[in-house]
Image (tube, helix red, strand yellow):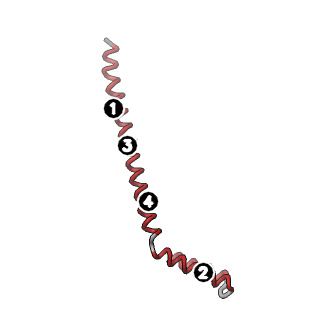
Amino acid sequence: MEKIIFFGLVIPIIGFVLYLGATAIMKGFSAKETNRSEKEEDIIATSSSPDIDQLSNEITKLNELRQSGVITEEEFEKAKKKLLND
């Protein structure tokens, strides 16, 4: 009789705990997938931006000027910082 009462109480409790665990795991997977898709959207949005291409071209031009001796290393660094901060 005691075993029946014990299992009558323990089995539903174990089932409920397993249900809560499975629900938490599934919510975690869902949140991870949502986060991954948001990061991919951010990467796509920033990588296809013409501003990045323009910035890269400006820094390349500055580097060429520095290598040819038209501007100094300090002027190059100042101009690069200005471009990156704007």
How far across and down, in percent of the image, does residue 19 sit? 34, 35
Q: Secondary structure at mark 4?
A: helix
Query: Left or right of 1: which side holds 79?
Result: right
Q: Secondary structure at mark 3?
A: helix
Q: Nearer the viewer, residue 37 or 74?
A: 37
- Can you identify the residue that label 4 sits on? 39
Q: How many marks?
A: 4
Instruction: Tell me which label, 2 or 3, sits earlier in the chain.
Output: 3
Q: Residue at x 33, y 31 (%)?
A: 16
Camera-nearest label, 2 or 3: 3
- Can you identify the residue that label 1 sits on? 16
State the CA–CA distance, disc 4 to disc 2. 32 Å
Q: Which mark is residue 78?
A: 2
Task: Check disc 4: other Cα within 10 Å, few if <14, some if 14-19, many if 20+.
Answer: few
How far across and down, in percent of the image, does residue 64 sit? 63, 82
The reply to whether discs 1 and 3 touch (Cβ–Cβ < 8 Å) is no
State the CA–CA distance, disc 1 to disc 3. 15 Å
Q: Which mark is residue 26?
A: 3
State the CA–CA distance, disc 4 to disc 3. 20 Å
Instruction: Tell me which label, 1 or 4, sits earlier in the chain.
Output: 1
Q: Secondary structure at mark 2?
A: helix
The three-letter code of the residue at mark 1 reads Phe
Q: Quadrant of the rendered structure where residue 75 is? A: bottom right
Camera-nearest label, 1 or 4: 4
How far across and down, in percent of the image, does residue 67 sit? 67, 82
The three-letter code of the residue at mark 3 reads Met
Camera-nearest label, 4 or 2: 4
Q: Residue at x 30, y 20 (%)?
A: 8
State the CA–CA distance, disc 1 to disc 2. 63 Å
